[in-house]
Amino acid sequence: MLKLRLLTWDVKDTLLRLRIPLGESYAAEARAHGLQVEAEALNQAFRQAYKAQGQHFPNYGLDRGLSSKQWWLDVVMETFRLSGVREDKVLLPIAEKLYYDYCSKRNWELLPGASETLQQCQQLGIRMAVISNFDRRLSEILAQCDIQKHFDFVWSSENLGFAKPDKRIFLEALRISKVPPPLAAHVGDSYMNDYRAPREVGMHSFLIKTAGQPASWETEVPQEHILPSLTCLPSLIEKG
């Protein structure tokens, strides 16, 4: 049984996931503005636009003077341009609407077992927090999904100014919590960001595996560090 005083969590695809595929919600908003764009084309274009934006402006371009909102507006508009939409006067209202829609509960849902697992971990008396590569909307999303109440603090990479796998994000959480690394663990779905990075500062870590999705890191991670579901976690830990 692993003794812990602090348990930190990633959010997207760990505790929350999109309720419907991104391309479908983008296509629906386009239709509301009189445009017809295929959802799959938008999915592919988004991946391209998001990757390029992240490479040119890491962590929402904070060190280049961008705001996270402008960063996202640029991604959304470029997604539509890559899908063949050229009406820029229509793109900004679509991007604005989608930016605020993705702060709403209707676009997010809890992963199976998330609420139950958080409650059980809290009942164990272990302090919990969020450490996520996310923007300033994170706290509002967690509140709307009724899980912010479980966390002592919620840190997004925008708030802190640096993103996982930067070790400073974990070191700062340990410092604020006054918890030594061997009594802390992190849970997430990214091998580099959520498994390797916390271990490099002496923390424990677990990776959640989404059913039906093969994970490239499985051969690199001991089986006891892989969670087939969130509900497996409480039986592995206790308050230290």
Image: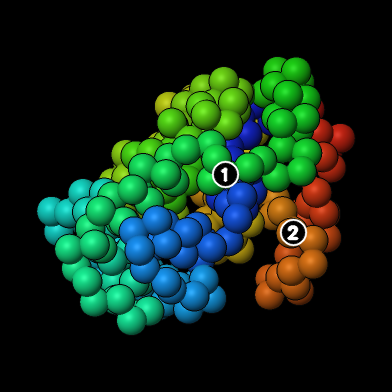
Give the residue at x 38% y 51%.
Answer: 98
List x then y, in percent, for residue 54. 33, 67
Give the residue at x 43% y 51%.
Answer: 133
Does the image show residue 233?
no
Say above or below: 46 vs 206: below
Q: Mark 1, mark 2: which one is toward the viewer?
A: 1
Q: Secondary structure at mark 1?
A: strand
Give the residue at x 66% y 40%.
Answer: 110
Q: Quadrant of the N terminus?
A: top right
Please tell me in which quadrant of the rendered image residue 121 appears. Answer: top right
List x then y, in percent, for residue 178. 49, 25
Q: Which mark is residue 180?
A: none
**Kind of residue indicated by mark 2:** Lys
**Kind of residue indicated by mark 1:** Trp
List x then y, in percent, for residue 144. 52, 29
Left or right? Give the position of 42 relative to 226.
left
Q: Which mark is residue 209?
A: 2
Left or right? Give the position of 85 relative to 65.
right
Left or right? Give the position of 217 relative to 51.
right
Pointer 1 or 2: first along the chain: 1
List x then y, in percent, for residue 49. 35, 73
Q: Quadrant of the C terminus?
A: top right
- Give the residue pinned by disc 1: 108
Say above or below: 115 vs 40: above
- The foreground one among 31 and 222 is 31
Dot 2, crowdedness within 10 Å: few (<14), some or many (≥20)?
Answer: many
Left or right? Give the position of 6 relative to 130.
right
Q: Are marks 1 and 2 in contact (CB under 8 Å)?
A: no
